[in-house]
């Protein structure tokens, strides 16, 4: 089975997150608020909330903070409403970029995202300008160090309903269809697996190979600026770095 592993991007994201935990906790709290409003405060009956709680724990967010965010969202007023908006565009080197945001001020967020694109020799496009190069997939990452037997992990993943299995040097990426993501994740958890990372979102179908060092540096700076923005939750791209 074949595909492109997102592990390098995941590692990069985690390194960036470790440098600014306060900002990460704020973003996770927003995700919790949206998940609770969409499906209620009980993670057992709200798969999206269950997923966000797992991400919060992976980011070392204290349980008290998690429970506080859930309770606040369950009784939140209008001031806590967030709108999800995805912006699309091209970065330097023709790299396709999708920026998922949660905002209570779309004018501010649009201006911020456009500024980051422009400042780093990119171009923010209209909806659909790059999304055709991505497809919605579930991605579940398992550490090779924790589970060394690749054949066993692969068989367990496929038996659980995974659509693809991508072994890498440090990890295995289990890929799922959007509608089976939570089912596969729950099945693997029941088999005793823990996850380095998991997400449901756009995965690039074609990759952009950028060799020029100055362009690569500019891309790194652009992605860092997106990650630092309070309204930006996730950044998806097709840079083969």
Image (tube, rainbow, N blue to C red):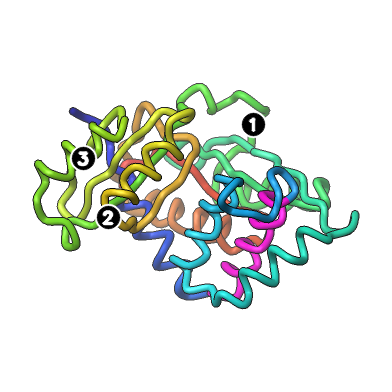
90 to 81, vertically: above or below: above
101 to 18, vertically: above or below: above
153 to 31, vertically: above or below: above
The quadrant where residue 204 appears: top left
Residue 125 marker: 1
Real-space Cα distance between discs 2 and 3? 11 Å
Name the residue rendered at 76%, 45% in the picture: 83
Disc 2 target residue: 192
Mark 2 secondary-structure assignment? loop
N-terminal label among 1 and 3:
1
Residue 24 position within the rendered picture, expressed as x and y whole percent measured from the top left: 57, 67
Task: State how many labels appear.
Answer: 3
Disc 3 target residue: 156
Side of 101 relative to 55 (left or right): right
Residue 153 marker: none
Name the residue rendered at 48%, 28% in the picture: 179
Q: State which quarter of the image contains the N terminus.
A: top left
């Amino acid at each position: 089975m074949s595909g492109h592993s997102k592990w390098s991007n995941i590692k990069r994201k985690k390194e960036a997150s470790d440098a600014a935990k306060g900002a990460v906790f704020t973003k996770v709290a927003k995700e919790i608020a949206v998940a609770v409003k969409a499906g209620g405060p009980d993670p057992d009956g709200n798969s999206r909330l269950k997923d966000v709680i797992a991400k919060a724990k992976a980011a070392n967010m204290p349980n008290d903070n998690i429970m506080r965010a859930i309770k606040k969202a369950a009784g939140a007023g209008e001031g806590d409403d967030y709108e999800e908006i995805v912006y699309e565009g091209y970065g330097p080197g023709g790299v396709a970029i999708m920026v998922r945001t949660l905002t209570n001020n779309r004018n501010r967020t649009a201006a911020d995202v456009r500024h980051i694109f422009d400042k780093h020799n990119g171009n923010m496009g209209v909806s659909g300008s790059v999304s055709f190069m991505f497809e919605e997939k579930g991605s579940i990452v398992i550490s090779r160090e924790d589970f060394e037997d690749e054949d066993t992990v692969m068989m367990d993943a496929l038996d659980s309903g995974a659509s693809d299995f991508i072994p890498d040097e440090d990890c295995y990426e289990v890929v799922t269809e959007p509608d089976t993501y939570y089912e596969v994740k729950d099945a693997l958890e029941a088999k005793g697996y823990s996850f380095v990372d998991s997400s449901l979102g756009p995965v690039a179908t074609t990759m952009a190979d950028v060799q020029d060092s100055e362009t690569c540096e500019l891309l790194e700076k652009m992605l860092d600026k997106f990650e630092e923005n309070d309204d930006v939750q996730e950044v998806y791209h097709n840079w083969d770095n």
